[in-house]
Amino acid sequence: VMIAAVGSVRDVVAAYNREPGLFRNKVARLLVFIGEASDPRFTEYNVALDPQAYIGLMRSGLPIYWVPCFDGGVGKNAGHASFWQARHADLLRSAAPPVVQFFIYALEKEQSDPLVFVRQTVDPPRRARLLGGTRNLWCTAIFGVLAGRTPTFDGQAWVLGPARTGQLTEERFANDLFAFSRVDVSIGDDAAIRYGQAPDAKPVMRFEIRDPARYAEAMTAVTADLLSKLGASVDHR
């Protein structure tokens, strides 16, 4: 199986510690969104939630596909993190009304019945407030790769290509926007990553951006494409 983990990785490491043999036999890839790629002085939020879980993960020798949240400190991406920013208007311009209502409900901390709320007509002022915002993003566009869907420029826009059958090989993980490459990492008791060969170093596959100039634009478009398909076949009348 393949596991994607966002957050502290506490539950993943707890499962590994409970049955390490079973975990190694059953898990083919462990895709984790956590940590800082290059600045040992910066402790990323998810690491701070449970530093010992992060240390245990990076010392485990499991088949880790590591997606650092930042590279160079908070809000920075020097090429080995997934972080980007997008305008809500770009993400939700083609989203179905219930999807827009869902985000209004969540971001404005609406207290009414959620199932009733998402079926209501979108209030124009609330929609305008929503679309005027921006969002820090890390994950959504990358998840498609797990299903064999590749970010592709179709001549007009970036979209996720159709799912491909068969085993998910290293080549299928790579695309024009991002890929993974092997690095040897060791981690100190301070939860800081260090690169290079060392007695305690373990190999991991680290995320890398292949096209920095188009990365944010393309990832935004792919995410918007996914959001536009939520509920697209449902009659919202």
Image (cartoon, rainbow, N blue to C red):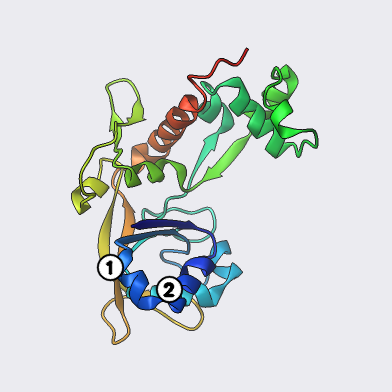
Q: Can residue 192 be seen in this view?
A: no
Measuring from the top left, give residue 172's x and y in whole percent.
22, 46
Figure quadrant of residue 21: bottom left
Q: In this view, does 76 lie above or below 39?
A: above
Give the mark nearer the N terminus: 1 vs 2.
2
Q: Residue at x 77, y 35 (%)?
A: 110
Q: Quadrant of the N terminus?
A: bottom left
Q: Residue at x 29, y 69 (%)?
A: 25
Tag count: 2
Who is closer to the viewer here, 120 or 123? 120
Q: Give SS at disc 1.
A: strand
Who is closer to the viewer here, 25 or 197? 25
Q: Give SS at disc 2.
A: helix
* Left or right of residue 206: residue 110: right
- Which of the labelled discs sits on residue 183, or is there none? 1
Q: Residue furthest top?
A: 237
Q: Residue at x 46, y 68 (%)?
A: 39
**Mark 2 Cα shell of 10 Å, populated few (<14), some (14-19), many (≥20):** some
Measuring from the top left, give residue 28's x and y in whole percent.
29, 61
Who is closer to the viewer here, 187 or 118? 118
Q: Quadrant of the C terminus?
A: top right
Q: Is residue 236 above or below residue 192?
A: above
Measuring from the top left, give residue 81's x and y in whole percent.
41, 55
* Left or right of residue 27: residue 56: right
* Left or right of residue 96: residue 202: left
- Which of the labelled discs sits on residue 16, or is there none? 2
Evaluate if marks 1 and 2 touch, with contact meaning CB atoms under 8 Å apart.
Answer: no
Q: Distance between the residues labelled 1 and 2?
A: 22 Å
Q: What residue type is labelled 2?
A: Tyr
